[in-house]
Image (cartoon, rainbow, N blue to C red):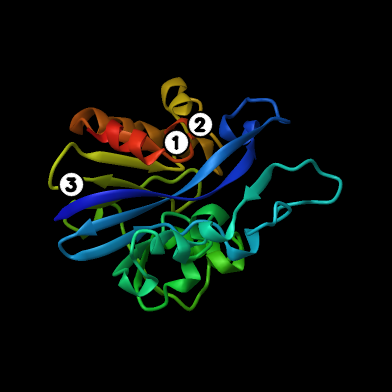
């Protein structure tokens, strides 16, 4: 059974406002948190996502293109690297029993390569995109122990992986049923912010029509279960105490 859900911050990025919400004008950068989640269950420890690559530490030019204004500027310090984030919880990489990799963008899969002895749950469409070169190589390391999963897969009781494509082909959201308290719906990047959720205007999507269907599905889940919804990069949800209060 799922006993505890911990929100972990793995640094920030400054992201252009046009990425946050379709139709927004470009040119304004918004500070976006990079989240990981530590799930403690009676079956062991599961980690959801691994933050940014080590190459982003002190490197705000990771995405720079000559002659182009910056769209994403990583703000990562050494203490934001995944093993440092886990160490502050008294956990080492070997203590993690399985990794849930929701998708392979730089701020979600940058530390995946550390998890070589654990099963890595991922949707097969994300693996297919990785093989085509869609993601940074450190985020799509072909040597890991990938476990391709289908929709509604449960790696452990109380944790359900929902295939919510649109942002990427194999994007996963996560529905959590803790042993105590109300359910939690982690939209991950299917929905960046409360504004996206309320306005029905999504953030960055590879396939906007598919993304809208995924959001509609997540709203159905939230309505039918009464789950507390936690968004992928909402800067107003950036403190763990605030997030835990939302869960109650």
> SS of the residue at dot 3?
loop
Q: Which residue is mark 3?
A: 178
> SS of the residue at dot 2?
loop
Any part of residue 217 in sight: no
Q: CA distance from mark 3 to mark 1?
A: 22 Å
Q: Residue at x 62, y 25 (%)?
A: 23
The residue mark sitting in front, 2 or 3, is 3
Foreground residue among 228 and 102? 228
Please say if the residues under marks 2 and 1 sit with CB atoms less than 8 Å apart: yes
Q: Which mark is residue 231?
A: none
Task: Tell me which label, 3 or 1, sits earlier in the chain.
Answer: 3
The percent coordinates of residue 107 (x first, y second) are 54, 53
Q: Residues within 10 Å of mark 1 (few under 14, many from 20)?
A: many
Q: Is residue 223 above or below residue 204?
A: above
The percent coordinates of residue 175 (x first, y second) are 27, 45
Q: Which mark is residue 202?
A: 2
Q: Residue at x 64, y 58 (%)?
A: 56
Q: Which residue is mark 1?
A: 191
């Amino acid at each position: 059974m799922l006993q505890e859900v911990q929100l972990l911050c793995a640094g920030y990025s400054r992201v252009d406002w046009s990425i946050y919400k379709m139709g927004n004008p470009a040119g304004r950068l918004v500070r976006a948190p990079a989240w990981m989640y530590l799930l403690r269950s009676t079956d062991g420890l599961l980690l959801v996502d691994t933050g940014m690559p080590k190459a982003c530490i002190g490197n705000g030019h990771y995405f720079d293109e000559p002659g182009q204004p910056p769209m994403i500027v990583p703000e990562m310090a050494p203490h934001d690297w995944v093993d440092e984030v886990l160490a502050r919880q008294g956990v080492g990489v070997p203590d993690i029993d399985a990794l849930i990799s929701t998708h392979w963008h730089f701020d979600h899969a940058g530390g995946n390569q550390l998890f070589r002895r654990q099963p890595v749950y991922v949707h097969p469409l994300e693996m297919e995109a990785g093989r085509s070169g869609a993601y940074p190589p450190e985020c799509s390391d072909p040597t890991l122990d990938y476990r391709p999963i289908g929709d509604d897969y449960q790696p452990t009781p109380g944790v359900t992986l929902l295939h919510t494509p649109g942002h990427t082909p194999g994007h996963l959201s996560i529905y959590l049923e803790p042993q105590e308290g109300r359910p939690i719906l982690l939209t991950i990047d299917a929905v960046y912010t409360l504004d996206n959720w309320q306005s029905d205007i999504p953030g960055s999507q590879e396939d906007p029509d598919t993304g809208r269907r995924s959001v509609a599905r997540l709203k159905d889940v939230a309505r039918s279960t009464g789950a507390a919804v936690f968004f992928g990069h909402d800067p107003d949800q950036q403190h763990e105490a605030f997030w835990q209060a939302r869960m109650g």
